[in-house]
Amino acid sequence: MPQSSRPSLPLVMAEPRGRAKPPRHLADLSLDERTAYATELGLPAYRAKQLSTHYFERLVDDPDEMTDLPAAARGELVAAFLPRLMTPLRTLEADRATTRKTLWRLFDGALVESVLMRYPDRVTMCVSSQAGCGMACPFCATGQGGLQRNMSTAEIVEQVVAGARSLARGEVPGGPARVSNVVFMGMGEPLANYPAVVGALRRLTEAAPSGLGMSARGVTVSTVGLVPRINQLAELGLPVTLALSLHAPDDELRNELVPINTRFSVDQTVDAAWNYARITRRRVSIEYAMMRGINDQAWRADLLADVLLARGDWGWVHVNLIPLNPTPGSKWTASDPADEREFVRRLEARGIAATVRDTRGREIDGACGQLAATADGSSR
Ligand code: SAH
């Protein structure tokens, strides 16, 4: 129920009619659907599996390397199943090239970003799920430009596969490696593009050659808190990690920082997160961007502890404090480190696990949407 009389935001933004769709790609389809599509095109059914192996297992994109396909038919097969979805416009590197941020141009000119972060024990890909975002959080660069469009399943998956390819080719220092984690913390609100995101979750976790064969536990979906979608995701049976961008424990402040809160209150949103943890047995991560003098007071740490512990203390939740990465022209700045430490101390004193997120890639505008926002501005 809407908790205030403000006009409610549509949960899934309607897309303008008649807009061209991203090219159909095998990653949009299940293996069965790919096989049916091959048959429809008058091709032998096993071509679907061969192409799937090239894409998800061998990570090749050059038709010349697909030597099990008849040379004369390769071009046509690749055009039908593996059309080009996105073109890299810029890559920025940081942390001795173990953090790589790529700005992509989609088929229709829309810009999105992905970030690869290599750690000693894992590689995380941060992906976008929409071009732009309709959630309008005032501290977030993406939120300022509004929503352009939803991304397709294949456009989401391709960001991970592109990262996997560059790792397999040894382009990232540290030798060949695989992508172990995917976080939906790039541009967009993943649960406002629910069907395409669920498709991507399936492709990421299905065994090869149907998908990439990742563990669902390594995948995190981050959301502003679209309550009905959180409940739906809980019932899906894919135990991905849920991250809830809470940023404030009280409705008054959260209404300002995360405007969808006027539709789903803190209580309703945290209930949904708790329900997700209960059903999936996965610990939920509460995201909290620390903003100086705004949401970082000691009393708000206590209130946050109250809100979380009201749902039980069985370790269902973990708080991830994110030092704010100020966006250009933003009136907010990052918290004082002493306030940050006190915030953590108060949560821990109440038995709540809390960590401060490292700030990888800060110098390459690690905060979501900043690179695309700059590119967009300079091209106008
Ligand atoms: N729409 C989703 C996922 C994208 S943003 C969501 O809101 O969860 C991923 C995380 O980065 C969110 O917690 C978001 O609030 C946070 N974020 C956005 N802009 C930021 C900034 N300038 N500094 C720090 N964190 C930011």
Image (cartoon, rainbow, N blue to C red):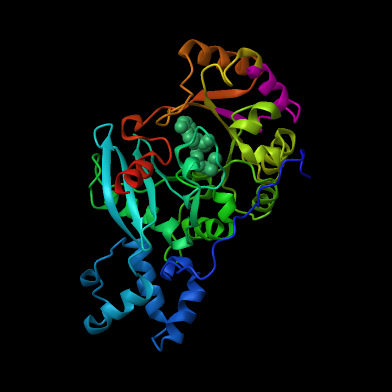
Give the residue displayed 24% in from the left and 33% down from the top.
96
Which stretch appears magenta? 300-320
User: From what the image shows, is residue 241 above or below residue 322?
Assistant: below
Where residue 360 appears, as percent x and y from the top left, is 36, 31
Near-viewer residue (203 or 213) = 203
- Left or right of 163: which side holds 252? right
User: Is 169 placed above or below 36 here?
Assistant: above
* Whether residue 207 can be seen here: no
Q: Up-down: is 132 above or below 291?
A: below
What residue appears at the point 45 percent right and 69 percent down from the top-left corner? 20
Q: Quadrant of the N terminus?
A: top right
Q: Please identify the quarter of the rendering in which residue 94 is found.
A: top left
Say whether residue 34 is left or right of residue 164: right
Q: Horizontal and vertical percent for residue 97?
A: 25, 37
Does 303 lie within the magenta span? yes
The quarter of the picture where residue 124 lies is top left
Q: Does the magenta stretch include residue 152?
A: no
Q: Is residue 271 visible?
A: yes
Image point (35%, 72%), residue name: 51
Which residue extends farthest front? 380
**Residue 263 position within the rendered picture, expressed as x and y whole percent measured from the top left:** 71, 42
On the image, the x and y values in percent for residue 38 come to 42, 82
Horizontal side of residue 99 vs 307, given as left or right: left
Residue 266 vertical position relative to residue 378 in the rendered view, above or below: above
Q: Nearer the viewer, residue 237 or 158?
A: 158
**Tally of numbered discs:** 0
